[in-house]
Amino acid sequence: MSRFKADLLLLLCAFIWGTAFVAQKDLHAAAWPVLFVASRFLLSALLLAPLALFEGRRPAAPPVRGRDLGLGVLIGACLCTGATMQQWALTSTTATNGGFLTAVYVAFVPFVVWAIAGTRPRPMVLLACAIAVLGAWLLADHGHGQGWSTGDLVLLAADLLWALHITLIAKFLGQLNRPFLLCFIQYAVTAVGAGIFSFCTEHAVWADFQSGLPAIAYAGIASGGIAYTLQIVAQRHAPAAEAALILSLESVFAAIAGALVLHERLSTVATIGCLLILAGAVTVDLAPAVHRGLMRVVRGAAKAPPG
């Protein structure tokens, strides 16, 4: 697969994830957000099971070790917790806020990599994080700057899990080139974990559940079965910085979908906040390239003969 095709797949992921916020927000009045998570990822797991099975039967398929399964379960636990927190948070915030605040995870990824791999983030990355957090503050409370709502705070906390999720995916694929197996494991773990939690805490009524089936189908098939899978496949053919930059555009699609479907509107201050979050995400992704460019300029100037 060429890098251009991989970029197109990542852009499709961003579009699906952004529009999925509308489907998730559409169920905010229901009393079973955790059951929604369990249902959508159960559907995703069922869709990926045949692909994972076919992948494992290939002659060149690498064997699965115990540490691979353990890492896959940990990735699924991150997805389960992050998705549940996100779905619950959307009961007290807008789809637009949900999309943009979720995009802040891009700024957290370097710190998670630092904690796991020991690679310290550059000063430009720290600046990008400050820009993204400032944007989140302006976006909070519909841009009035009066403070974050409970849903906004939960979304920001979930960003740490999304950052860990993305970092561990890269680690898994470095250990075992079985992307469909990873997709199935994380979907199954999420469906089981959220299902148990929902059984203990929620009391869904069949009539309400039935009315939410279209949203479950869209989130389970498009957002889960297709987008998450395409993300893992495409990231094998695109540089990490480029992939994260394209995926951060889900916030733009969330804002557009929120405006068209849910008639949500952003104030001028909130719009500035959105732009700052995107600027922070872009800065994080471009920081390594800018650093390499500056170093080339410095080395070129040092080698140049005196005038």
Image: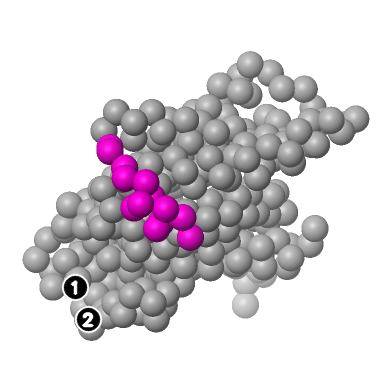
Residue to which mark 2 is pinned: 267
Q: Which mark is residue 143?
A: 1
Q: Position of residue 222 (x, y in %)?
A: 57, 58
Q: Position of residue 188 (x, y in %)?
A: 55, 33
Q: Residue at x 47, y 43 (%)?
A: 39
**What colouring does the structure picture have?**
one colour
The answer to whether residue 139 is left or right of residue 81 is: left
Q: Is residue 94 visible?
A: yes
Q: Residue at x 70, y 61 (%)?
A: 6
Q: Residues within 10 Å of mark 2 (few under 14, many from 20)?
A: few
| Region in magenta | 202-214
Q: Answer yes or no: do the residues labelled 1 and 2 have beta carbons within 8 Å?
A: yes
Where 85 sits versus 96, above or below?
Answer: above
The span from disc 1 to disc 2 (Cα, nearest Å) is 6 Å
Query: Which of marks 2 and 1 precedes in the sequence?
Result: 1
Give the amino acid type for the residue marked by disc 1 in the picture: Gly
Give the amino acid type for the residue marked by disc 2 in the picture: Ser
Q: Residues within 10 Å of mark 1 (few under 14, many from 20)?
A: many
Residue closer to the observer: 285 or 103: 103
Q: Position of residue 190 (x, y in %)?
A: 47, 36
Place residue 173 in its image quadrant.
top right
Residue at the extreme right of the image, as rendered: 59
Where 273 sits versus 128, above or below?
Answer: below
Q: Is residue 272 visible?
A: no
Q: Residue at x 39, y 81 (%)?
A: 260
| On-image quarter of the C terminus | bottom right
Residue closer to the observer: 177 or 193: 193
| On-image quarter of the N terminus | bottom right
Where 122 sits versus 303, above or below?
Answer: above
